[in-house]
Image (cartoon, helix red, strand yellow):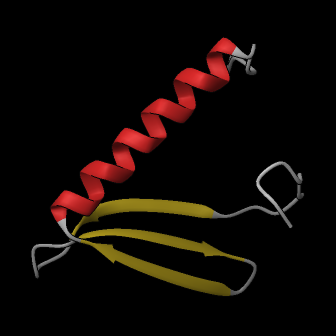
Amino acid sequence: MGINDERDIEANLQIGPTDKGMVRLFIEGAGIEIPMDFTPDEAREIAEEITAAAKAASQMGGKKRR
């Protein structure tokens, strides 16, 4: 499965700080829970990558939410 392969799977994403000073992405779905912890610097890098991907998708005519 690659980034362009569509799947019909639902999941919830929660993002927030932990009590240990990390940033946690918590993914829950299909009977699994995946906690992913990042340093604040790593989280900023991820945020930059998401922003760049959103910009690229918009330039490619990405779907707009209603």
Q: Residue furthest bottom?
A: 32
- Asked whether, in this view, residue 47 is left or right of residue 23, the answer is right
Quadrant in the picture for the N terminus: bottom right
Give the answer, above or below, for where 19 lies relative to 60: below
The location of residue 7, given as percent across then percent down, is 88, 58
Q: Residue at x 43, y 61 (%)?
A: 14
The location of residue 17, given as percent across then percent down, is 20, 66
Q: Nearer the viewer, residue 2 or 15?
A: 2
The location of residue 54, given as percent across then percent down, is 55, 29
Image quarter of residue 26: bottom left
- Asked whether, in this view, residue 48 is left or right of residue 28, the answer is left
Give the answer, above or below, for where 6 lies relative to 13: above
Give the answer, above or below, for where 28 lies relative to 40: below
Q: Residue at x 76, y 54 (%)?
A: 3
How many numbered discs sit on the rendered protein? 0
Image quarter of residue 25: bottom left
Q: Residue at x 89, y 58 (%)?
A: 8
Quadrant in the picture for the C terminus: top right
Q: Nearer the viewer, residue 65 or 62?
A: 62
Q: Residue at x 60, y 24 (%)?
A: 56
Image quarter of residue 49: top left
- Asked whether, in this view, residue 16 is left or right of residue 59, the answer is left
- Asked whether, in this view, residue 66 is left or right of residue 28, the answer is right
